[in-house]
Image (spheres, coloured by chain):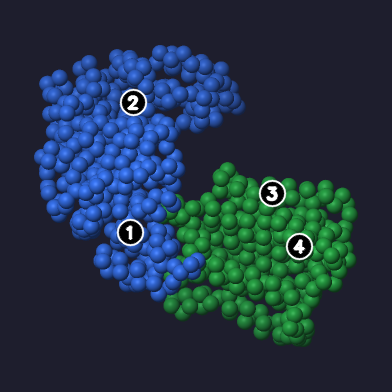
Amino acid sequence: MRLAAQILKYSRLLIIAALFVGLTLASPVFLTGSNLINVVRQTALLAVLGFAMTLVILVGGIDLSIGSVLALSSCLAASYLKEPSTIVIGTIICLGVASACGFLNGLMVAKIKLPPFIATYGMSWMTRGLALVFMGGNIVYGFPKTFRFLGAGYMLGVPTPIWVMTIAFTVLYVVLHMTKIGRNVYATGANKEAAFLSGVKTDRVVIGLYTMAGFLVGLGALMYISRLNAAEPGIGESFALEAIAATLIGGTPFTGGEGGISRTLTGAFILTLLSNGMNLLGVSSLWQSAVFGSVIIFAIMLERISKKLGND
Amino acid sequence: MDGKCILRMCDITKTFPGMIALNKVCFDLNEGEVHVLVGENGAGKSTLMKILCGVYGKDNGKINLCGVDVEVKDTKHAEGLGISMIHQEFNLLPFRNVAQNIFLGREPVKGPLKVLDEERMHKEAKSLLLSLGLNLDTKTLVKELGVAQRQMVEVAKALSMNAKVLIMDEPTATLTTREIEQLFATIASLTNKGVSIVYISHRMEEIFRIADRITVLRDGLFVATVEDPSSITMDELVAMMVGRRIEKRFEKPPVELGKEVLRVDGLSSGGKFEDISLYVREGEIVGISGLVGAGRTEVARAIFGADPKDKGKISLFGKEIKAGNPGTMVSKGVGFVPEDRKEQGLALIMSVKDNIVQASLDKVSTGPFINGPKEKKVAKRYVDELRVSTPSVQKLAKFLSGGTQQKVVIAKWLASGSRVLIFDEPTRGIDVGAKQEIYKIMGDLVKDGVGILMISSELPEIISVCDRIYVMHEGRITGEVMQTDANQELILGLAMGKEVVQ
């Protein structure tokens, strides 16, 4: 039993190791520099969106509006980002719109007491609709080089998205694990009533987290359209589900108060490895969805068993 | 009405893990009588009645109904036998109409296809309600009815099952005076038809008004059945309920009482409590006594700012606090140990350390950053001081025993330096040894000049621990008793709404 418990505790590292070994044997392309950089680059966007999702899941919430907010904020900012002289304004608009959407989500959840699922589901339709209306069937494409640097460029030989993700991770990690704010986040997630009765302003914590999640979505929007070199209202349909998948596979439970962004980083990496491997092996994208679904369920089953064996 | 005996419960015993809820209790019921069942909180009244109507199984004893021994399997079976209970929280479906509720699961049908006979259902429902003196449209949805009308629907439902025994658990708790008169009229007409009623109540006046007989339970034991209620006084009845067990559990150290730390003036909150005024001084332990549902916890939460108040003033250390919320109250030196430590006091999935420093993060932080070694030191200090039995401060709170968890909650408020502490049922559900330790901690706190406001349902506890006791009844303070004058009869009398001139 002890051994089983230990294995389960490090199950995610084992899964990554197994994927590495398996894919190296199965595909000659896998273990090449360019492919690995590709994997890490894709991980970066998923991780940033996963962090956003993890923040709200930590307090027992969820944010289904991630993909649509990403589309709206990038569409509103796109025309500014296209002109080198207004890139800064565009960036501010993108981050500002996404943060505002997050703030509204937080208000609906904390103050109006809507279930997070419903509040963010509604927000998702609203923002998607607004993005479609605003663009009126048009697409913005062809961003200047300075902006494309964010999604497609390199700094000191490392793709820029990885820098962005690393900075986001570091800041969030420090705040969540070393500050009073972070402690109040976990306390609110673990037992909101007890935190409230200990003097924590739990409503502010919740609103703050949804707003921060919105900001990260804005950051993801910039990374995504910069790489895509285009902005259109239909982007990011699957992002909310992928972000949830990264969080769950990483091992942050829906119940709140446990887990964190380092787990989500692992989860995002596993998902990207899987997807990369299946692409290399020529598995159709239709099958890939089915595989992801079963991986999520499997990961959560492992989690449950691990809990039963007393890993806390 | 003196009818023949239709129900006899003999030597009923029921144990729950760690306690004996009923010990060889006897109870009998005559045809067409109102038999009142009284006792303190936890005396076993509800347990006895739940056994009768099949909610709980019994460990031992016999139930004899109309001369036949029966084993009540479940509530459905009980209803079939003609035993129905009207609960305090009604078992009605709010979005179904009156007739649908009355005949739920037993709808009249017609024809070979067993189609619902809507017409007959409404007709029968109507006549049942009319027999109770209630002219109500049977198509009204239950959610649109008032409490009194819902109660009548419940009674009609019971009658539709040919109830011979009707158990009413504090039926007047939420009724207005006029509605109570109506209920009593209904009860009279029911007993005239030969229905027998077991009536659980805490209200002295009404007990003496409607009781044909009174049975008293205490601590799961049968005390007595009073055959003629007019032969005893209220005080005698209260004395039977509390018995003669006064044990001194706790000697509060002699403490010089200081300045007022907490004052509450005219605090009201819509329907929950009204016009509450109280004060607590340095070094004083002040109790709030009362029956379950009297509004004690609601008052405590409003003082702490956890629930809004409609009216009234709260002052700390002589200064009025305007918009109170737990955040400001904590920063001003107030702590709250809630009733339900697992749900409200602790984050079970967090460590002992995290729980202890939760209300004093400012003290263990440098700027925004938590100082790891410092918070560990603080946590260790209080773990040692309160003798919290945990292998390490990293242990998750969920692995600790109830008494130890309670100490962690108290440690949280010691760490935050609280000068006013509100305890809501601090010793509920913890063992005797841990109780003594909690009392001792309270003693040490008042020696340091902390003021304590404590809610407790246990009369012996509140009498031996508190310097002064406020007693609440239905949202109001009905009396203030000094420890030297306190006895269980006096407090229970006040808690049950007996007017006392002081």
Q: Amino acid at mark 3?
A: Met
Mark 2 chain? B
Q: Quadrant of the C terminus of chain B?
A: top left
Indicate left or right for A274 with B187 as reference: right
According to the image, label 2 marks what residue?
A: B172
Tag in front: 3 or 4: 4
Residue B90 location (% of width, % of height): 42, 31
Which colour denotes chain B?
A: blue
Tell me the SS state at disc 1. loop
Tell me the SS state at disc 2. loop
Distance between mark 4 and mark 2 Cα atoms: 65 Å
| Residue at image location 64% in from the left, 70% down from the top | A168
Tag in front: 1 or 3: 1
Mark 3 chain? A
According to the image, label 4 marks what residue?
A: A91
According to the image, label 1 marks what residue?
A: B417
Tag in front: 1 or 2: 1
Asked if the residue under mark 2 is in contact with the one under mark 4, i.e. CB atoms within 8 Å, the reply is no
| Residue at image location 43% in from the left, 45% down from the top | B324
According to the image, label 3 marks what residue?
A: A123
Mark 4 chain? A
B339 or B86, nearer to the observer: B339
Asked if badges 1 and 3 are on one and the same chain, I answer no
Asked if badges 4 and 2 are on one and the same chain, I answer no
